[in-house]
Image (cartoon, rainbow, N blue to C red):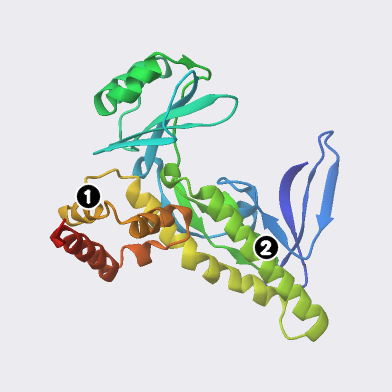
Amino acid sequence: MTFEDVLREQDSADGRVCGIRGRLQDGQPVQFEARVVVGADGTHSPLARAVGARELVRHGKDEGSYNVYAYFSGLPVDAVEFHSRPERMAYAWHTHHGQTLVGMILPGRSPRVPLAEVEAMFMGELATHAPSLAERVRSAQRESDWTAASVGSHCREASGAGWALVGDAGVTVDPITAAGITLALRDAELLSGLLHEGLRQEGLLGQRTLDAALADFGPQRDVVSRPLHQFAQDMAQLQVPPTEMVNVFMALAGNQAQIDRYFGVFGQTVTPAEFFDPANLQAILSGAAAASADPV
């Protein structure tokens, strides 16, 4: 079915959404009524347009990361490889059918090259910033076309009367942290719990309406999603970290608990605010200083 528009209650003051209408593959019009319409229809969400969901934050393609990648066979890698340099990040890891994904992330403001020149550009960049990986890539077999792309990011209004957005429809995150699918699943779980509770309360106790449950979704989503959205956007700049942060990263060596917390930011088990809290950063530095002062 092709979505065309939402249905709205004619007698409601806020034009509450009560279903959708569209067309089947053969062109036949069809419509479905629903208590709540959930849009999980991607970053260009037709549902978001239909309900007029406001954009709370938007970043254009040139403000994020620019990814160039392809899949290779016969390419040995040691688990997951990252080679981070100022304004560049090369990566490689095994995927499916014996293939390895290899890519390079550049700032979105980087000049684009014609598709026919992407491989030469990529291999030149890789040889400069990760020569050991470049040598292995040259000996491997490319199994896919090159993909070179950048995406804008946004955080939209999460819900309204009779509707809600999840996944990229609600929050599109720059892919540099690979956090988008985790955010999507977490937001979907949050919304389903709120809807379940709203329906239960409405049906059994009459104390909580469905609209009240929907109204809670945005604030609860944004406590986690918006900081992670901004964290990814900041990382996408690929700028040289300030000296203070370089010192912190150096102090992480050997501190497995804090290393786990840092990668927990990407896995969304630790918030950016928790890890980058000045008290936590000072604890990392103090721990490294104490360890270096201990006699061998």
Residue 121 on image: x %, y %: 33, 20
Dividing the picture into quadrants, the one containing residue 296 is bottom left
- State whether residue 67 appears in this view: yes
Q: Is residue 146 above or below residue 261?
A: above
Residue 13 on image: x %, y %: 70, 74
Residue hosting label 2: 163
Residue 99 on image: x %, y %: 53, 24
Amino acid on which the number 1 mark rests in the picture: Pro
Q: Where the N terminus falls, by quadrant?
A: top right
Q: Is residue 260 above or below residue 111?
A: below
Mark 1 is surrounded, within 10 Å at the Cα level, by few (under 14), some (14 to 19) or many (20 or more) other residues, namely few
Instruction: Check disc 2 and report its element: helix, strand or loop.
Output: strand
- State whether residue 169 appears in this view: no
Residue hosting label 1: 241
Instruction: Check disc 1 and report its element: helix, strand or loop.
Output: loop
Dividing the picture into quadrants, the one containing residue 140 is top left
